[in-house]
């Protein structure tokens, strides 16, 4: 009897061990599936889509598991993104290995949760296109309101699914504001074309946009340290990083879709107080000369000097300028420093082939717009004083002259720096913010149309 009891105990212990091992295998398989579900949205090859199919099967051969783990780790390491623990990728425990090859990224768990939720929504076929016949304001009645309310709830912007009313009630209006804020839209609770466009973006499209932009940003940030400046063009935002922390934030204005701000990396090498503005030819022909044809006084009113090809100052009457602007115009415009100078008080110069730079503006009211693709390619900075003061405190060599020149609004002064400041103009249309909210922005230059 005692021998039988010992045998039963050994059998139960073995069965418990097998059950525990199987559970760890299944848990490892789930972790791998979650990873390849994200990578399949990003990788151009079909490899990770095939891995999704393999990991959907109840059983996985050890050779398949090792190949999948290796390719996942390689995906991150090729992008210089560290994984959790390279050493533990060689352990015998498949669950530990699956955890070890996850990337060391802030917000990665939130990314997984959002992608999983969006992919689940995509499987439900709950996203037929909503059509809009008119603007719908708070308090209005319209038959599309229940569909809008349900969609806001599914995306996490509404606390309840108010599908029993055709009225745009205050709770739905508040949810719309949260939705509009997350998409860089005017937060007016009005259902118009832009808001409806984003409401109609399918969960599958959202998952693809988020995954691609998240990993693109992660790859970029993994290769940066120290001090650097980032301008995210679709977000109309500037951030100054210092050892991983955001030192300074500002809204910015970027180029119009037909005069886009380029994507580039350079380094700020000089700061200019009271800059003059040498008007590029394209801007002169497209923007200034049409004004001169209407009003010959435009040149004097805006403090422009006009020079010929030999750099000689040219003086004409308003009537003569108006006539000259109607034909070939072999001159160039330079706007003098002053309160109405287009570049404002500061210019931050960095070498590039596009002749773009950061600068102040003479029209700060434009920063209140939600769509700030308004310039001819240069970047206008709202918190320009903050950026200038930071540069003066940290990089400007001649600090006394910097202080002295601020009293004179009309004298241009270039300032050299102790060291350059890297600046990166990037293009990210989705990210997870510090509050774990997913932010989306319009693809203003149609650069991610295939997402």
Image (cartoon, rainbow, N blue to C red):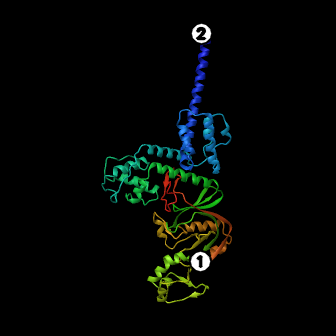
| Circle on res. 407 | 1
> SS for tag 2?
loop
Calculate the distance from the C-alpha at mark 1 to the C-alpha at mark 2. 102 Å
Direction top: furthest residue: 1
Is residue 382 depicted above or below 242 in this figure? Answer: below
Is residue 446 depicted above or below 5 in this figure? Answer: below
* Marks 1 and 2 close (CB-CB < 8 Å): no
Residue 341 in the image: x percent, y percent?
53, 77
Observer-nearest residue: 371 or 61? 61
**What residue sits 60% from the left and 26% below the top?**
17
Residue 347 in the image: x percent, y percent?
59, 72
Which residue is denoted by mark 2 in the rendering? Answer: 1
Residue 293 in the image: x percent, y percent?
46, 83
Where the N terminus falls, by quadrant?
A: top right
Lateral position of residue 305 relative to residue 126, left or right: right
Q: Residues within 10 Å of mark 2 (few under 14, many from 20)?
A: few
Mark in front: 1 vs 2? 2
Residue 362 in the image: x percent, y percent?
51, 74
| Circle on res. 233 | none
Is residue 52 depicted above or below 352 in this figure? Answer: above
Picture quadrant where residue 133 is located: bottom left
Observer-nearest residue: 434 or 390? 434
Lateral position of residue 142 relative to residue 287, left or right: left
> SS for tag 1?
loop
Q: Residues within 10 Å of mark 1 (few under 14, many from 20)?
A: few
Query: Number of numbered discs present?
Result: 2
**What residue sits 49% from the left and 80% below the top?**
289
Please report whichever mark, 1 or 2, sits nearer to the chain's N-terminal start: 2
């Amino acid at each position: 009897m005692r021998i039988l009891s010992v045998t039963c105990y050994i059998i139960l212990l073995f069965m418990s061990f097998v059950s525990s091992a199987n559970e760890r295998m299944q848990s490892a398989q789930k972790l791998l599936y979650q990873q390849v579900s994200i990578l399949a949205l990003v990788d151009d090859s079909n490899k990770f889509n095939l891995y999704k199919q393999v990991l959907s099967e109840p059983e996985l051969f050890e050779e398949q598991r090792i190949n999948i783990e290796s390719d996942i780790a390689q995906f991150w390491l090729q992008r210089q993104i560290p994984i959790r623990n390279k050493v533990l990728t060689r352990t015998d425990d498949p669950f530990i290995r699956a955890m070890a090859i996850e990337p060391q990224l802030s917000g990665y768990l939130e990314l997984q949760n959002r992608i999983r939720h969006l992919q689940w929504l995509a499987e439900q076929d709950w996203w037929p296109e909503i059509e809009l016949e008119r603007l719908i304001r708070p308090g209005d009645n319209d038959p599309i309101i229940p569909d809008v309310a349900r969609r806001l709830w599914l995306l996490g912007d509404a606390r309840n699914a108010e599908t029993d009313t055709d009225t745009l009630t205050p709770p739905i209006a508040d949810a719309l504001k949260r939705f509009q804020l997350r998409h860089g839209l005017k937060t007016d609770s009005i259902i118009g074309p832009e808001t409806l466009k984003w409401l109609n973006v399918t969960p599958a499209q959202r998952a693809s946009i988020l995954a691609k932009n998240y990993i693109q940003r992660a790859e970029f940030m993994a290769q940066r340290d120290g001090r650097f400046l980032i301008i995210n063009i679709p977000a109309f935002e500037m951030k100054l990083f210092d050892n991983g922390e955001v030192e300074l934030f500002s809204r910015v204005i970027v180029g119009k879709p037909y005069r886009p701000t380029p994507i580039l990396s350079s380094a700020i090498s000089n700061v200019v107080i009271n800059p003059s503005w040498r008007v590029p030819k394209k801007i002169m022909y497209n923007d200034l000369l049409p004004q001169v044809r209407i009003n010959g006084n435009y040149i004097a009113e805006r403090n422009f000097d006009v020079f010929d090809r030999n750099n000689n100052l040219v003086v004409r009457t308003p009537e003569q300028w108006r006539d000259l602007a109607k034909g070939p115009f072999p001159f160039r415009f330079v706007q003098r420093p002053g309160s109405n100078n287009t570049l404002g008080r500061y210019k931050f110069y960095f070498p590039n082939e596009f002749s773009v730079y950061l600068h102040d503006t003479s029209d700060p009211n434009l920063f209140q717009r939600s769509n700030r693709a308004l310039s001819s390619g240069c970047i206008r900075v709202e918190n320009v004083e903050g950026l200038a003061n930071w540069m003066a405190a940290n990089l400007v060599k001649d600090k006394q002259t910097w202080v002295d020149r601020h009293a004179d609004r009309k004298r241009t002064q270039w300032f050299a720096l102790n060291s350059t400041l890297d600046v990166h103009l990037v293009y990210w249309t989705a990210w997870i913010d510090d509050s774990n909210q997913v932010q989306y922005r319009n693809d203003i230059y149609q650069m991610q149309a295939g997402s």
